[in-house]
Amino acid sequence: MSVKEGLGLIHVYTGNGKGKTTASLGLTMRALGNGLSVAMVQFMKHDQGSGEYVMSKKLENFTLIPCGLPELVDPKNISDAERAAAAEALVKVKELLYSGEYDLFIIDEANGAMSWGLISVDNMISILNGRPKNTEVVLTGRNAPSEIIEIADYVTEMRFVKHPFDKGIGSRKGIES
Ligand code: ATP
Ligand code: MG
């Protein structure tokens, strides 16, 4: 069996501890080293200065598309523009996923976008169900909906134990972005 023939499962990285997006980037490195191609679409992210975005521009087989507005999304006060950006991100997911060009497809913050109601869980599931057979998918973000956990093959919860945010240490370049 070729490397690609063995692919096609769904991963979920959820929970309140650090490590969801970075775990998916670790998987990206492993996949690239095996000659696979990788796409990551990020919901609710705008940053084109993140380490992963800069690296994606240098790596031939890694495409990263941040989709979102510059401001942080407040789950209690979601704007029409934020909903529109998430809807566009979902269109992008479908377009790239169905292109069949990618072996590993990461939908970063998909869980947050679903649990905050920016996109519908049913839409996401029907898009995932229609994907090319040998595309491995990763969904990251807190509060993964139960329907997503149901259809996933790997589910990992990053459990919060400590985070330096609680001592007043904010996001650091090279570590958090
Ligand atoms: P990373 O991108 O570092 O792997 P993550 O994807 O697990 O983190 P997110 O839920 O996407 O975490 O959070 C976005 C940012 O918030 C990350 O930069 C992360 O370091 C930080 N963060 C993660 N957990 C906590 C926490 N419990 N309290 C405060 N900030 C956190
Ligand atoms: Mg993340």
Image: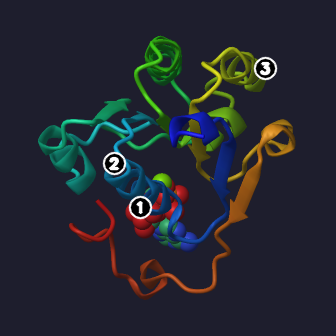
Q: Position of residue 104 (x, y in %)?
A: 48, 38
Above or below residue 12? Residue 88 is: above
Give the distance between the C-alpha atoms of the residues marked 2 and 1, in whole angstroms: 10 Å
Q: Nearer the viewer, mark 2 or mark 3?
A: 2
**Residue identified by numbered label 1:** 26
Earlier residue among tags 1 and 3: 1
Q: Residue furthest left?
A: 58
Residue 169 appears left or right of 138: left
- Res 122 label: 3
According to the image, label 2 marks what residue?
32
User: Residue at 60% across / 40% down in the picture?
Assistant: 1
Q: Residue at x 66, y 17 (%)?
A: 127
Camera-side residue of 19 and 135? 135
What is the quadrant of the C terminus in the image?
bottom left
| Sequence-wise first label, 2 or 1 | 1
Q: CA distance from mark 1 to mark 3?
A: 28 Å
Image coords of residue 68 (percent x, y): 38, 30
Please state if 68 lies on the left or on the right of 2 as rendered. left
Q: Which mark is residue 106?
A: none
Q: Amino acid at mark 2?
A: Leu
